[in-house]
């Protein structure tokens, strides 16, 4: 009798990433992945100790792809911004994985490459070494939060988007000016969360980098 096929780590990650395109981290399971591969869960645990380790490995492959061919250019702020936009674009193509990165993080080679580039950029800024880890952490948390938030918006269906827009219009344009005077005053200028996302992303990041720059002696 022919035994079951032995899947390589890369083949497992390829299949898992594809499965996550149509599901989220909560509904994803090693058992479901094993079923798609036509094997049993125990064979996958030879490659990954648990679901979290597997998810981190998947997210790390996105980081590796992001850093592939990356050539730092410009001053420290330009380097950080360029890296941030590369991460945004990479996870924008795989929004389900962005939520995984934001929640589970990664400790693989891709993660180390991203950390190295951020730290190298900050070292060229003129910040004292003692302040660099704190500034790095703030940038990393900000990027993970912004990218994961965008991913959540990207995964909704057109019907869900329209429903949300209708609720937004009712909540904002229909606000009672006596109970919500500020909201009623600015209602026509308030933009929904899904609007101008790249511009908002760049503006929020720029504000954080300006704050860091102000700390440079």
Image (spheres, helix red, strand yellow):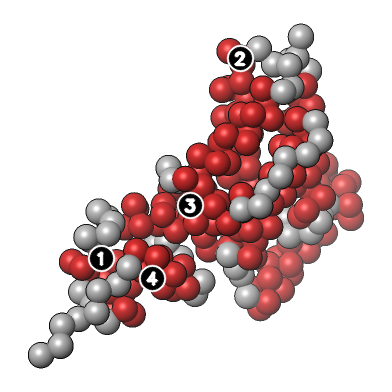
What is the secondary structure assignment of the residue under circle 3? Answer: helix
Depth order, front residue of 8/55: 8
**Residue 129 x, y percent position in the rendering:** 61, 14
Rendered location of residue 190, percent (x, y): 83, 52
Q: Which of marks 4 and 2 is in front?
A: 4
Mark 1 to mark 2 CA distance (whole Å) = 42 Å
Task: Calculate the distance from the C-alpha at mark 3 to the C-alpha at mark 2.
Answer: 27 Å
Quadrant in which the N terminus appears: bottom left
Say which quadrant the C terminus sits in: top right
Going from the N terminus, do you reach mark 3 or mark 1 first? Answer: 1
Q: At 44% across and 58% down in the image, what residue appears?
A: 58
Choose top left, top right, bottom left or bottom right for residue 32: bottom left
On residue 11, which mark appears?
A: 4
Name the one closer to the observer, 214 or 85: 85
Q: Name the residue under label 1.
A: 44
User: Pointer 3: residues within 10 angstroms few (<14), some, or many (20+)?
Assistant: many
Q: Is residue 115 above or below residue 210?
A: below
Q: Look at the numbered disc 4 and give the secondary structure of its residue.
A: helix
Does 47 appear above or below 155?
above
**Mark 2: secondary structure:** helix
Which SS class for mark 1?
Answer: helix
- Left or right: 115, with 14 as reference point: right
Residue 129: assigned label? 2
């Amino acid at each position: 009798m022919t035994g079951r096929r032995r899947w390589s780590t890369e083949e497992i990650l390829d299949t898992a990433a594809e499965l996550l395109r149509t599901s989220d981290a909560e509904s994803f399971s090693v058992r479901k992945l094993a079923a798609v591969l036509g094997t049993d869960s125990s064979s996958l645990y030879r490659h990954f100790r648990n679901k979290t380790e597997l998810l981190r490995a998947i997210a790390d492959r996105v980081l590796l792809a992001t850093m592939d061919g990356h050539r730092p250019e410009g001053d420290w702020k330009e380097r950080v911004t360029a890296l941030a936009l590369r991460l945004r674009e990479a996870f924008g193509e795989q929004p389900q994985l962005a939520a995984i990165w934001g929640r589970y993080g990664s400790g693989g080679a891709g993660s180390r490459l991203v950390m190295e580039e951020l730290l190298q950029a900050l070292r060229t800024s003129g910040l004292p070494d003692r302040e660099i880890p704190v500034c790095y952490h703030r940038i990393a948390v900000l990027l993970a939060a912004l990218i994961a938030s965008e991913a959540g918006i990207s995964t909704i269906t057109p019907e869900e988007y329209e429903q949300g827009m209708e609720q937004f219009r009712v909540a904002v344009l229909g606000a009672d000016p006596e109970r919500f005077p500020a909201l009623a005053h600015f209602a026509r200028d308030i933009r929904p969360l899904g609007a101008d996302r790249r511009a908002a992303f760049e503006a929020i990041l720029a504000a954080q980098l300006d704050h860091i720059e102000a700390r440079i002696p």
